[in-house]
């Protein structure tokens, strides 16, 4: 069965960096687009970024563009989110999510999430 | 960016009730509208995609419909396990925006 396991969350000061990972199993990782979606405490869902199945195309939410970078390693079935110049408003649970196809923009499987807290 | 306006933000209902949640897109998104359910402390779960297609394993009491830029999620007879938050999301073009969510509570 499909499994997505995020890691790398924690407490970080404003302006610092953090890299999240998402280990995927149970499906042919290299064939699917992958996303990051976040949820601030007590708030709704916010889509963050998508990467195509082969890593050649990416798209970001305006709120993270220029600060966050999505990438993937298809040889190790792992998705990444490099987060630089973090702000307090980036505090959230970060979910990795599998696209239902190579790039259809919706998500049929989600990880359990990893909490990122940006605070001084 | 496409804005998704979801209503109501909260809703109280009883087991057996029929409930409807609506979502309006700020522009045409064809039928690229999806619905998710999120229980407290858990990851969201895909219920319906492309406005009206039920995801595999989702009970048939859930249904979706579309009329122009207006979309509806209907639960025909609420079950205890349906009390959760519900989100619409457009997949017409990135950024793939969500509605603000609807919290469905027990009356």
Image: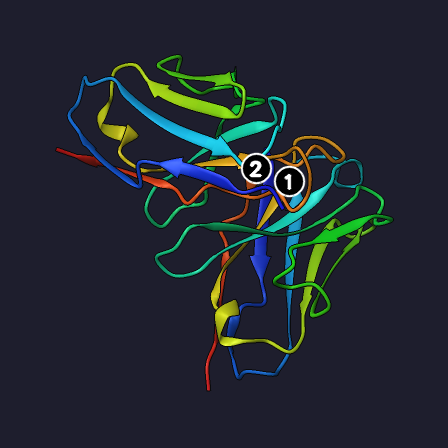
Q: Is residue A115 left or right of residue B90?
A: left
Say what secondary structure mark 1 lies in.
strand
- Residue at figure coordinates x 64%, y 64% from the top left: A64
Output the chain of dot 2.
A
Q: From this viewpoint, which residue is outermost toward the left? A: B107
Q: CA distance from mark 2 to mark 1?
A: 5 Å
Pointer 2 or 1: first along the chain: 1
What label does residue B41 carry, if any?
A: none
Q: Is residue A32 left or right of residue A55?
A: left
Asked if residue A36 is positioned above or below residue A25 in the image, the reply reads below
Q: How many marks?
A: 2
Q: Are marks 2 and 1 in contact (CB under 8 Å)?
A: yes
* Quarter location, residue B101: top left
- Residue at figure coordinates x 49%, y 75% from the top left: A88
Q: Nearer the viewer, residue B87 or A93?
A: B87
- Residue at figure coordinates x 51%, y 42% from the top left: B98
Say what secondary structure mark 2 lies in.
strand
Q: Nearer the viewer, residue B37 or B81?
A: B37
- Residue at figure coordinates x 50%, y 18% from the top left: B66
Colour scheme in the image?
A: rainbow
Q: Which residue is mark 1?
A: A98
10 Å crowding of disc 2: few (<14), some (14-19), many (20+)? some
Output the chain of dot 1.
A
Please state the horizontal and vertical placement of residue B81, each as a whole percent of the image: 27, 29
Q: Which residue is mark 2?
A: A109
Rendered-image quadrant of the N terminus of chain A: top right
Please state the horizontal and vertical placement of residue A89, each as a whole percent of the image: 49, 70
Q: Is residue A101 left or right of residue B73?
A: right
Asked if residue A82 is positioned above or below residue B76 in the image, the reply reads below
10 Å crowding of disc 1: few (<14), some (14-19), many (20+)? many
Q: Nearer the viewer, residue A77 or B29?
A: B29
């Amino acid at each position: 069965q499909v499994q997505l396991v995020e890691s790398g969350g924690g407490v970080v000061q404003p302006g610092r960096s953090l890299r999240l990972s998402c280990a995927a199993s149970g499906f042919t990782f290299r064939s699917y687009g992958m996303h990051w979606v976040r949820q601030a405490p007590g708030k709704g869902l916010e889509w963050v970024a998508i990467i195509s199945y082969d890593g050649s195309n990416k798209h970001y939410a305006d709120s993270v563009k220029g600060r966050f970078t999505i990438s993937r390693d298809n040889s190790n079935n792992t998705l990444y989110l490099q987060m630089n110049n973090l702000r307090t408003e980036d505090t959230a649970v970060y979910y990795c999510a599998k696209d239902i196809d190579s790039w259809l923009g919706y998500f049929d499987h989600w990880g359990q999430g990893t909490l990122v807290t940006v605070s001084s | 960016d496409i804005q998704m306006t979801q209503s109501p933000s909260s809703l109280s209902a009883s087991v057996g009730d029929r409930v409807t949640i609506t979502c309006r897109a700020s522009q045409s998104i064809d039928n690229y509208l999806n619905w998710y359910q999120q229980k407290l402390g858990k990851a969201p779960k895909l219920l319906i995609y492309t406005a009206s297609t039920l995801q595999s394993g989702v009970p048939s009491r859930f249904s979706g419909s579309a009329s122009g830029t207006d979309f509806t999620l209907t639960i025909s007879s609420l079950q205890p396990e349906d009390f959760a938050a519900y989100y619409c999301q457009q997949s017409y073009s990135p950024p793939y925006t969500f509605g603000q969510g609807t919290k469905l509570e027990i009356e």
